[in-house]
Amino acid sequence: MALTSDNEEEYYSSPEEAEEAGDDDDRMSFRTASNESDNDAGAGDDADDDCLYGDSDGDGDDGMYDEYEGDEEEGLEEVDEEGGVLDEMRFTATQYAVLTMDEVRARQEEHTARVADLIALPPALAAAVLRHFKWSAQGVWERWFSDEHKVRDAVGLPADGDAVSVAVNDAPLTCYICFDAHGPGEMRSAGCAHFYCRGCWSGYVRAAVGDGARCLSIRCPDMGCSAAVVRDLVDDVADADDAKRYGEFLVRSYVEESKRLRWCPAPGCDRAVEFDGEKCTVQLDAWCACGHGFCLACGEEAHRPVACDTVREWLDKNRSDSETAQWVLANTKHCPECRRPIEKNQGCMHMTCSPPCKHQFCWLCLGPWGKHDGGNYNCNTYNAARAEGKYTKEELRRAQAKASVDRYLHYYERWGAHERSRQKALEDTAALGKDGAQREAVAAAFGVVETELDFLEEAYRQVAECRRMLRWTYAFGYYVDDPAKRDLFEDLQSQADKSLERLHECAEKDRTSLVAEAAGEHGAVADKYLEFRPRLSSLTAVARNHFENMARAFRDGLAEVEVDPAVAARRAAATPPPPPLDDDDDEDFFEELRM
């Protein structure tokens, strides 16, 4: 991408154009946190307003935002503020922070301390109040000062007076659990008048912790008391293991009950991602330090540029049994006698239904097999009525079911194929990275130092990101009903796919060919390397621009893209599917299938 003299964006359709224009410096990292998706266009203003911390002291920005922001600072002035790819990426990359477990714990303590100062409570009790409001300081502010008595009652704080998290007896008392007498300072209470010995408190906490996260909501053991049992009391009376588990539940609560935080869903990763706002409500891909990407709005894997609703619907469809039923319709036939679905598992056409039916019939015409003896065999006879488009109701249902399965498999196969290619690209990226197994050998083959191979690693990173984006466009394409929008979508998808395949082939096949020629031909390979490097860099830039254009079009609802007339003509000439059946007929057929 470049800027014309009128400060308008110019995109290249080939690497030759990009190379001639000298656009090598205007590149964007593949790890971009995405903007709103296609059906979220128009929500941008609201999203901007949401991207603020609830507290105004600016403590939220501790420099822990993700690493993908820093590399794009240079050259940002060359991009138009309203539409520049780099400026857009810089904005989205600062919308979330990746936190380690220790950083999550520090955030929680800092958050609790500020609220404790605000409502004049001990930090442990302030944490109980915060948790009641899903760790929202704004919720505490609004409800505490509007109806403090109601909040105290709900949380388990005394109605008036100074609240304490732990009280110690100052006189001899009897524990009303074990009924042993204890001297001053040997019993504890949750700030109420019900004191119990340490042994009974320890057992009470151990049972609560064993019950899971519900231990954060336990109250005084006295049946008529609702005093909250908080962290200070647990640390005082519980053994080390129980106190540690309670603390872990409290930290997890801070992430899982908050609207701003999500755990990274990657297996074995204990990092959390914090959204820079009250709640992420639109599609926003975040990349954890472990390398896993996921959407902050819905929690599914990163799926830019497709909307969260589309992703949910697609994944639900993949997990559901509906496609199994469609496969049964497309690949089985009903026994003409008992109507049970039968799959053909042998070569001959003579079918025998399972007991107790045992009806024998022909797989081709579904007629009784007895009529195929002698001169009654007519399965080879041309059916003129069918040639004229006159189908029986069952034949029409079966044709529609097969068309539905074929259409689903078309999108599902490509959705899965691009994910497999992405995984291979990630493996190649790791192998060619700074500590990769192939980096030294490739550098030696090209006759260059290892630091000069960064362009190759960047190309593979771009391939992996483009594969991910292209993968999810097939989920979107499955649900596109509007013919005009489908034409626009397929045109964009085709352009992006073509640029990606050119890039991937150059990075994979051309590179391996050059390395294979390296033995005994260092001079020739060096010359070819000087041609290979700018070509791969140009293809990387072209693919990046094509996919960013596609992402913007999705965000804008595919509203401002012109379609190649040949694409529209091809779509118009496509054979329409069989006419739909009445709903009643469909219901009857599925009822037969369930029999």
Image (spheres, rainbow, N blue to C red):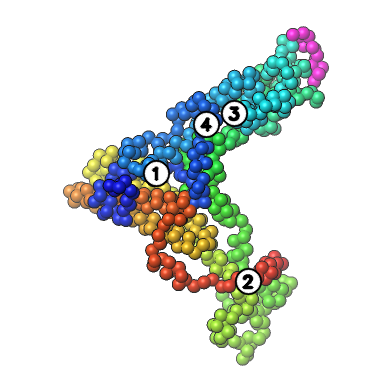
Q: Are marks 3 and 2 in contact (CB under 8 Å)?
A: no
| Residue visible at 60% across and 79% down in the picture | 391
Residue underneath mark 1: 82
Q: Is residue 385 left or right of residue 354?
A: left
Q: Main secondary structure of the magenta part?
A: loop
**Residues at badges 4 and 1 in contact (C-beta under 8 Å)?**
no
Front position in the image: 181 or 262: 262
- Residue at image position (56%, 75%) is 347
Query: For the point 64% across and 76% down, which residue is it?
Result: 393
Please tell me whether residue 353 is drawn above or below residue 449 in the rendered image.
below
Residue found at x 48% / y 57%: 474
Q: Which one is closest to the eye, mark 2 or mark 4?
A: 4
Q: Find residue 281 and report its horizontal and vertical position in percent.
A: 55, 42
Estimate the spatial distance between the alpha carbons at disc 2 and disc 1, rounded to whole Å: 49 Å
Q: Amino acid at mark 1?
A: Glu
Q: In terms of secondary structure, where does tag 4 sit?
A: loop
In terms of depth relative to the viewer, which is nearer, 228 or 170?
Answer: 228
Whether residue 569 is situated above or below residue 428 in the rendered picture: below
Crowd class of label 2 (few under 14; some 14 to 19; many from 20; radius 10 Å): few
Which span is picked out in magenta?
170-183
Q: Which residue is mark 4?
A: 53
Q: Secondary structure at mark 2?
A: loop
Q: Which mark is residue 286?
A: none
Residue farthest bottom in this picture: 375
429 horizontally vs 24: left or right = right
* Mark identifier at residue 581: 2
Between 79 and 180, the one nearer to me in the picture:
79
Proximity of marks 2 and 4: CB atoms separated by less than 8 Å: no
